[in-house]
Amino acid sequence: MSDETGTTQASSGLSDSAAGALAYVTIIPSVIFLLIDPYKDKPFVKFHAIQCLGLAVVGFCIGILNVIPILGQIIFLVGWLCLFVCWVICVIKASQGGAFKLPVIGNFAASQSGYNG
């Protein structure tokens, strides 16, 4: 359905940009968006859901470093700070209808989702 300005409006549910941003809240919305219609068929939403899951895996790996004394804890703190900054950028870009492709995770997410943005 189009309005007078020519932009497309969603007939029901969340807009793609809202769903993409919501996918980054936790891994729960990401998994839900990958499983339910109509979101699982939308490349934009699918890209952000997969990229969020990739960020969660990286966060888990960084968390493991916290058990190593001193050097591991420093890497843990710097890693979490970098991960948080990337997460904020991804949420902002998704809410604006764009995408911030993270170096490895973003390429994988784009190939799996078919998103070319």
Image (tube, grey):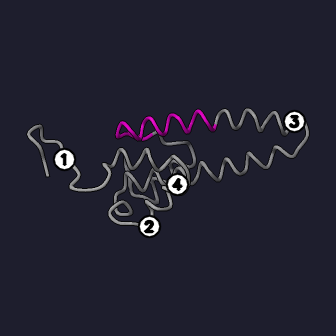
Mark 2 is surrounded, within 10 Å at the Cα level, by few (under 14), some (14 to 19) or many (20 or more) other residues, namely few
Q: Disc 1 marks which residue?
A: 8
Q: Disc 2 marks which residue?
A: 35
Discs 2/3, front = 2
The magenta span reads 83-99
Ranked by sequence position, the earlier of labels 2 and 1 is: 1
Provide the major secondary structure of the magenta segment. Answer: helix
Q: Secondary structure at mark 1?
A: loop
Q: Classify residue 112 as left or right of residue 12.
A: right
- Report how far apart the C-alphas of labels 4 and 2 lie in the structure: 18 Å
Of the 4 image quadrants, the one containing the C terminus is top left
Q: Look at the picture and state if 34 lies above or below 105.
A: below
- Report how far apart the C-alphas of labels 2 and 3 lie in the structure: 40 Å
Q: Disc 3 marks which residue?
A: 71
Q: Looking at numbered disc 4 in the image, what kind of residue is underneath it? A: Phe
Residue found 12% across the figure and 37% down from its top: 5
Q: Secondary structure at mark 3?
A: helix
- Report how far apart the C-alphas of labels 2 and 1 lie in the structure: 24 Å
